[in-house]
Image: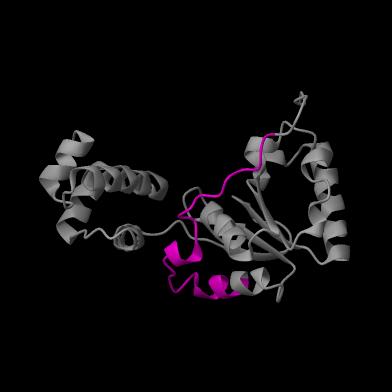
Amino acid sequence: MQRQQGQLPLLVQLRDDATLENFLPTAETEALIGVLESQCAEQGEAVVYLHGAAGSGKSHLLQACCHLTGESALYLPLAELYAYPPEEVLAGVETLTLVALDDLDAVIGEEAWELALFDLYNRAREWGCRLLIAASGASWGVVYHLPAGTDEVKRAILRFRAQRRGLQMSEEVVAYIFARARRDLAQLLEVLDRLDRASLAEQRALSIPFIKQTLDW
């Protein structure tokens, strides 16, 4: 793989809405939330590994833990950074409280990255740095699976996130959105973002006619 030359990109900005308060826990994820809160408080597991399909909430949880930990945490989306020299990307990060490594799949099979990550693992153990890792498949560490979520769960998440924004979303509106949008959670939340901005700009409630007009459905 050809490595990028020059300076590394600026630190990735965390999404403002990627917080634990904005993550709707289910019976399958309640225990995980407790584990993550302990890890952010420098207790419990030193290495936690999340695996699950796209849209299951892995990136949200990694960023949420960085928000919770504060300035002594770093979020590294490896899919965006894999073309840079790994020794530069990971230099000195073991001195932090928490390092969140997202999209591990992006660098698996890259010898330089695999060696650098193994070295980071050893340095993190020495310094007491916690590692939170996410990928689509299972790997090492204490492993937690994030289910993709049924339509019922996705509906609940959509209404929950709307409520967090101060938006009232009726069951009829949810059903209308589900009948027309892709049932991928990331896509559904993108629809919510668009509706939130339009609702604020026009000072209108979320009704089916308003959604038709805004999304051209």
Does residue 19 show up magenta in the picture? yes
If the image is split into quadrants, where does the N terminus sit?
top right
**Can I make out residue 52 in this image?**
no
The answer to which image quadrant residue 123 occupies is bottom right
Residue at image coords 50%, 47%: 54
Residue at image coords 76%, 38%: 109
The answer to which image quadrant residue 99 occupies is bottom right
Residue at image coords 22%, 47%: 199
Judge left or right: residue 12 versus residue 159.
Answer: right
Residue at image coords 78%, 24%: 5
Q: How is the image coloured?
A: one colour
Give the camera-side residue of 16 and 191. Answer: 16
Tell me which segment is drawn in magenta. Answer: 9-35
The answer to which image quadrant residue 124 occupies is bottom right
Give the camera-side residue of 14 and 23. Answer: 14
If the image is split into quadrants, where does the C terminus sit?
top left
Does residue 43 show up magenta in the picture? no
Q: Main secondary structure of the magenta part?
A: loop
Task: Tell me: residue 213, above or below residue 69.
Answer: above
Q: In x, y percent, where is residue 188?
A: 34, 47
**Can I make out residue 48 in this image?**
yes
Give the camera-side residue of 14 and 61. Answer: 14
Q: In x, y percent, where is residue 146?
A: 52, 61
Judge left or right: residue 164 versus residue 95.
Answer: left
Judge left or right: residue 85 versus residue 53.
Answer: right
Q: How many marks?
A: 0
